Image (cartoon, rainbow, N blue to C red):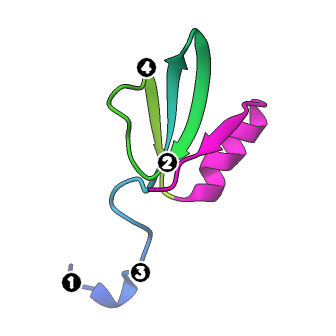
Amino acid sequence: MDDQDNWRYVGPAEPRYFINVMVESGEVVYTLSHFENVEAVYCEGFYDREAAVEKLRLHGYDYREEHQ
């Protein structure tokens, strides 16, 4: 704290995007959302949208984006 001139903005304190994995009608569904879904069987948070989309595409997952 003595040398505050060296501080810089590094990003949000909490994830802003979430990959939610759910089972709907016997099928696995991946969603990208601003909110963590409490009904999801798996949830992973990301600080930026590009990183979340990159992970989904890297694994070849089809996903839907939820806007709320």
- Residue nearer the viewer, 54 or 31: 31
Disc 4 is placed on an element classified as: loop
Dot 3 corresponds to which residue?
8
Q: Which residues are magenta?
A: 48-68
| Foreground disc of the pair 2, 3 | 2
Decide: is 14 above or below 31. Answer: below
Decide: is 62 above or below 51. Answer: above
Dot 1 corresponds to which residue?
2
- Measured Cα–Cα span from mark 4 to mark 3: 36 Å
The answer to the question of whether label 4 and label 1 lie on touching residues, with beta carbons closer than 8 A, is no
- Measured Cα–Cα span from mark 4 to mark 1: 44 Å
Residue 63 quadrant: top right
Dot 2 corresponds to which residue?
33
- Measured Cα–Cα span from mark 1 to mark 2: 39 Å
Identify the mark at residue 41; answer none if there is no mark: 4
Identify the amino acid type marked 4.
Val
Disc 3 is placed on an element classified as: loop
Decide: is 21 above or below 63. Answer: above
| Foreground disc of the pair 4, 1 | 4
Q: Tell me residue 32's x, y (percent).
A: 56, 44
